[in-house]
Image (cartoon, rainbow, N blue to C red):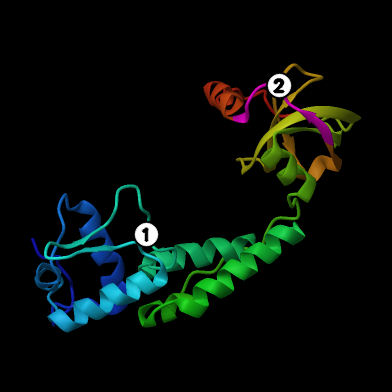
Amino acid sequence: MRISTSRPEDKLSRAERLPELIRYLREQRRPVSDAELAREMGEDLRTIQRDLAILIAQGAVIEDEAGAGYALPPDRVLPPLAFTVAEAEALILGLRWITGYGDEEFDEAANGALARIVAVLPEAGDYAAAGGDLLAPPPTPASCPEPIRLAIRDERKLRIGYGDRKGKATQRTVWPLAVGLFDYADALTAWCEMRGAFRHFRLDRITGAEVLGDRYPIRRAVLMADWRLQAGDEDASD
């Protein structure tokens, strides 16, 4: 079945066509000839051959099985920069939101990824690269300190200074799991050794954070599964 388009000429732009080629190849259980791909895309044979060459140059592992056609090996992923315009807009919006979030390493990573995407976007991505009509809100003052992110990544215990909801300053040793945007504030989800339970710690109340040498004794994936079972607990914030 031919891929439908809304264009009067019934043709996709190259920016739209490249990911569609990958998706079509992925759906097939057999090698597909370039002639069949040309029919599916509503393009001439030479255009499709050029598209396949571009995809391979971008990093797509497309096997040319002599006499049989083209196929994607099992478990292969899309080339990292073959995005539709909507996908590019979503990525750029997210990266712009992260930029300036308060973590220098994260900020640099987001800017680097954004520059790389914009540099290689095909022509149909120009609108997204220019910002489109989607504006990312500025980050909240409660930014995520780097030690919290590193402790989550390495599954290490974290010592935090914290002012609880009664205004009392405490020192906590926690097993950090995730940072999320909750209804009330940006918060760290963690197992608190003092409370013996999962707690949400508002980032704007954390006065200091130190990554400890000890790993927490239960894998993060297991703890996250347990937390999700208790996610409806309204008394989980300190």
**Left or right of 222, for residue 32:** left
Across and down, in percent, residue 72 comes to 27, 56
Residue drawn at (62%, 29%) of the image: 220
Residue bounds of the magenta highlight: 212-220
Observer able to see residue 145? no
Name the amino acid, label 2: Pro
The residue shown at (33%, 76%) is 54
Residue projecting furthest to the front:
66
Residue 97 against residue 120 in the figure, above or below: above
For mark 2, does the 10 Å Cα neighbourhood hold few (<14), some (14 to 19), or many (20 or more) residues?
few
Q: Residue at the spot x=49%, y=63% of the render?
A: 91
Residue 226 marker: none
Provide the residue designation for mark 1.
78
Can residue 219 be found in the magenta stretch? Answer: yes
Say what amino acid the circle numbered 1 marks: Leu
Q: Looking at the picture, how far across and down is residue 146, in whole percent?
A: 77, 50
- 194 up-or-down from 184: above or below: above
Q: Tell me the crowding category of disc 1: few under 14, some 14 to 19, or many 20 or more residues within 10 angstroms, Cα based.
A: some
The residue pinned by badge 2 equals 217
- Does the magenta run of residues contain 161? no
- What quarter of the picture does the N terminus occupy? bottom left
For marks 2 and 1, give the CA distance. Answer: 36 Å
Front residue of this view, candidates 218 and 59: 59
